[in-house]
Image (cartoon, rainbow, N blue to C red):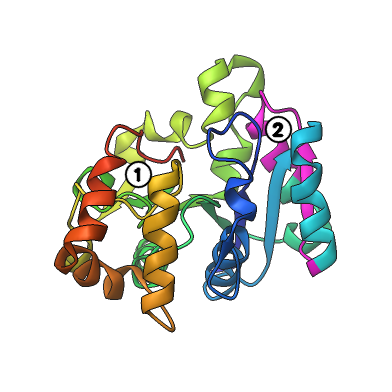
Amino acid sequence: MSVVAIIEASLAGRSLPRSVLLPLGDGTVLDQAVARARAVARSVAVCTTSGSADDAVAIHCAERGIPCVRGPEVDWFRTVRRALDSRRLADSQWFFHVPATSPLFSLRLARALLQRGDALEAEGRRVHLVTADESQMVAGGSVRLVRRSSFEAIDQTSLSPADKHAIALPLLRAPFQCAVVEAPAALRHPSLRLTLETPADYAVLSALFGLHERPTAEAVIPTLLGNPDLAGLNNGASSSRRPRL
């Protein structure tokens, strides 16, 4: 299976200044997401908007040699399509769709999605999307594996503004063509957050990266559950939405 990764990263309209470019571990939030994506995909590209607020994202990517594709803030769908048409990603059959605000997404789960996709291909079963039951998981722990040809077959002219802003929605509306992988037991904590939307989220992620030399979603959850101060911060961010994919 030929797999690449698309990482959505934007500073526009966020309540947390600089969000994905904030320092985290040995890099930035975006760097952590890119590093994880590279562990499960042969090529990675960042998608961001053409707005001036995201010039910093494009500059950051250019300085690090990370391919970056820009497009209208109101139409992520078109921007992702352009990224898939780029030379580095052109021959991929599947792509991981990754929000940069999930710098601790589970590599174990991502590999489980790949294994499920491979098994379905071997059985001759065609699905649009391989995902986990995210309602039962820690927020920010999952990604989605999307069949490129299914994504490209979507009629862009029929998309609503919500569809253009959350590219997996049209595929999720055909659940019989989606494969759902059971979330690993270690990730089944839907009340917890490992995503970045608020200052409290950032405080939690910074602390976890400081406590773990090589943090993973599975490793940091026991730390979060066993630390009352961190747990309190995590609960304080509960008013934020789960990350959009």
Q: Which residues are magenta?
A: 64-82
In the picture provided, is 11 more to the left or to the right than 120?
right
Question: In this orientation, does residue 78 appear?
Answer: yes
The mark that comes first in sequence, 1 or 2, is 2
Residue 161 vs residue 113, the one in the foreground:
161
Circle 1 crowding by C-alpha within 10 Å: few under 14, some 14–19, many from 20: some
Amino acid type assigned to the residue bearing label 2 in the image: Arg
Percent x, y of residue 210: 42, 75
Percent x, y of residue 140: 38, 52
Amino acid type assigned to the residue bearing label 1 in the image: Cys
Picture quarter with the N terminus: bottom right
* Number of numbered markers: 2
Q: Where, by quadrant of the figure, is residue 173 drawn?
A: top left
Percent x, y of residue 139: 32, 49
Q: Is residue 100 above or below residue 40?
A: above
Q: Is residue 90 above or below residue 81?
A: below
Residue 164 vs residue 18, the one in the foreground:
18
Residue at figure coordinates x 60%, y 41% from the top left: 17
State the SS at label 2: helix
Q: Nearer the viewer, mark 1 or mark 2?
A: 2
Q: Is residue 186 above or below residue 19?
A: below
- Dot 1 and dot 2 residues touching (CB under 8 Å): no
Residue 92 vs residue 142, the one in the foreground:
142
Judging by the rendered image, the residue that carries numbered circle 2 is 78
- Any magenta on residue 65? yes
Q: Where, by quadrant of the figure, is residue 178 drawn?
A: top left
Residue at figure coordinates x 64%, y 72% from the top left: 42
- Any magenta on residue 177? no
C-alpha separation, residue under disc 1 versus residue under disc 2: 22 Å
Judging by the rendered image, the residue that carries numbered circle 1 is 178
